[in-house]
Image (tube, rainbow, N blue to C red):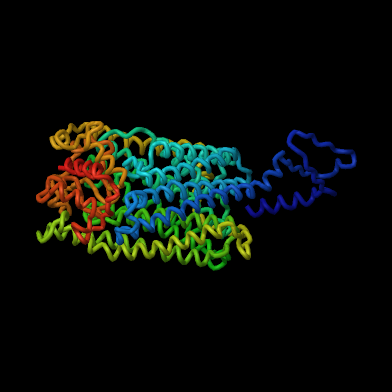
Amino acid sequence: MSSVLGKTAISRQCRMPTSVQLEFHRPGERSHTTSDQKGAVRVTAEIESNESDRIVGPEAASVMAGTYVKVGAALFAIGLVLSVLASFQLVLPDLLSESAFTTFGRLAPAARILMTAGWLPLAGLGLAFYVVSSVTERPLKRTGLAVAAIVLIALGSLAGAGALIGGLSSGISGQEAPLWARAISAAGFLLAASALASSAKQRADQLGAAGWYLTASAWWLAAVGAFGLVPLTSGVAGSIQAAFVASGHSRLFVFMMAVGLLYFAISRITGTDLTAPRPLAALGFWSLGVTWAFMGGVELIYSAAPNWYETLTIAFAIAAFVPVLAIVTDLGLILKGHVRDIADKTTLRYAMAGGAALIGATLVNLLLAWRATSVVVQYSTWTIGLDVLIVLGGGSFAIFAANNVRLGGGSRGSRIHQSLSMIGLIGSTAALLAGGIVTGYAWIAGPASQEYGNFGPAYKVSTVMIAPFLWISVVFLTAFAIGQIMYLLSIDRAADNPQPSKEPTFDYNLEFEGLDRYVTWKRLVWGTALIWIAALVMSAGLPIVDAQKADASIAADTFRSYPAGSVEEIGRNLYISEGCAECHSQSVRPVVTDVGLGPVSIAADYVHEDPALITGIRIGPDLMHVAGRDGFDSAVAAAHLASPRSIRSWSTMPSYAYLSSADIDALVKYIETLR
């Protein structure tokens, strides 16, 4: 090989021309050579008509991304303020309870919508435009669609949150916003995905890992948003359908988006080629999409859903560690030998925290799905801890990292923001997870010891045990919220000393002979579509068909049917609008934790319910058969709704004294059907 190279070099030297001429012309222009130029070697460079656009393309994309992030951060700050207020209400239940618009059942889901349907999609998609423009070195396409998408996504999340505060909840778990508000958001997701795809296609097969993840995440978000507009079937089938949509929106999209932004941020600060083919990144991409697309059943373990559906969910929860290993190894190879030389340590810390949160979320998710541990942590604050890790942790910190790169690294105030965010995330997550374990074992200990039960006056044990953990979580969540308000106020401030882009350096990467591109545009399009269709069929279609085979049980026909216009239906609608499902489940599982709560729930019990109110965090006791338990009294229930602490001093339920006597009577009538 060396001899061949040597001969080539000698040959070139012998034929060296006397002059070299550089010509620049636009495509289609002919070259003109004069007689005195015939002995020269001519090097031609074509300048495309949009060359000037290429130069300003990344800058224009940065401005677009900055607008998306700024609007998203404003919604994030509002959502966190509402979340902090709602968290305080769990330990100070009389706080702001005089008004219907400020109760926990309304504020908590409104806050969730602002963060998961506002902050994460806006900031994630906005930075995706910037990343794709940087990777392709081309200007954005269809900027009009991108601008319209900002308006629609922001409007949809604000309208959804406002509707919930106004008492217009749909009652659908994970999709509490009214249909019209979700339709506005879905239109925004579709426009953003279309604009991003048009920009990505300019260098379709050179997107690199960041481009794969971000482009696919936008498509999946648009698909989930559209499918979420399909009317729910009644009963357990509808709950499975809702779980698929909720998981795709707040799990699959967030993981894909976050990993894409982490690849971009880490590659930039290490000087790694963003377009380089990376087989481990490709393995992580396909396995991450497959596993998290099938994760909808995590919160339906031990429910009335089909057993095989639960088994499928558990299998994919275990398999989710395959992409973790692939992605962590690949990012480790990118960082290998560069950590000490990285000037932008702020971005590195954001990225490391985001990656750690995603890894932790994968483990927490597995323990929530695994039957042996689900007995303890399901329906507890453990579930909220998982949401915090994904939304406030992995998704948000990946956004912070990529946006810090966009601003030049080490932006003003980033150190304080970083400290408050990390402390707040770690403290609130630890408190919620630990609280879930403690209350779960308290639920087991009661029936096992036969000293107390998990309902009625005996529920005081659970309420007292969870209180310290709720106090700790609200303190740390407040610190996190303060950090994000500071972030919003300084979001446009570039770094005092911008870090220069790191020159390309030696990159550790695995390569397989004969494979140049692991995720081409064609594979990206068809692979993403096939994963989505397969997940739709296996995680929604077949379970829905299976669940619909159930005939109504005697309890469903006798008690749990609600004729239109009946007092019971009015009461059920009030139960939904007041957000009672935020603190009460309606599902008795075949586990020791639920001994004494009544007969185990089956799909036939929910046949007439649309939507079925199965899941919920048991801040209060399960209500599946509350009216059929010994000691239930309608008059006491009515008094408890109007003034909870006058009946039970330890209760954390808000007062519904603002409701009219007719509304309270209707609520009691509905509760009487829960037998």
At 44% across and 60% down in the image, what residue appears? 481
Nearest the viewer among 317 and 177 is 177
Residue extending furthest toward the right: 36
**Residue 205's x, y, as percent?**
56, 41
Residue 161 lies left or right of residue 561; in this view the side is: right
Residue 234 lies left or right of residue 177; in this view the side is: left
At 27% across and 51% down in the image, what residue appears? 657
Residue 529 lies left or right of residue 239; in this view the side is: right
| Quarter occupied by residue 98 | bottom left
**Residue 88's x, y, as percent?**
34, 60
Nearest the viewer among 339 and 445 is 445
| Quarter occupied by residue 157 | top left
Q: Is residue 643 visible?
A: yes
Above or below residue 662? Residue 336 is below
Residue 518 lies left or right of residue 556; in this view the side is: right
At 32% across and 50% down in the image, what residue appears? 105
Above or below residue 121? Residue 534 is above
Nearest the viewer among 551 and 48 is 551
Q: Is residue 514 visible?
A: no
**Residue 653's x, y, as percent?**
26, 55
Above or below residue 117? Residue 354 is below
**Residue 582's x, y, as percent?**
30, 49
At 46% across and 42% down in the image, what residue appears? 156
| Quarter occupied by residue 367 | bottom left
The C terminus - image quarter: top left
Please give the count of numbered marks on the rendered protein: 0
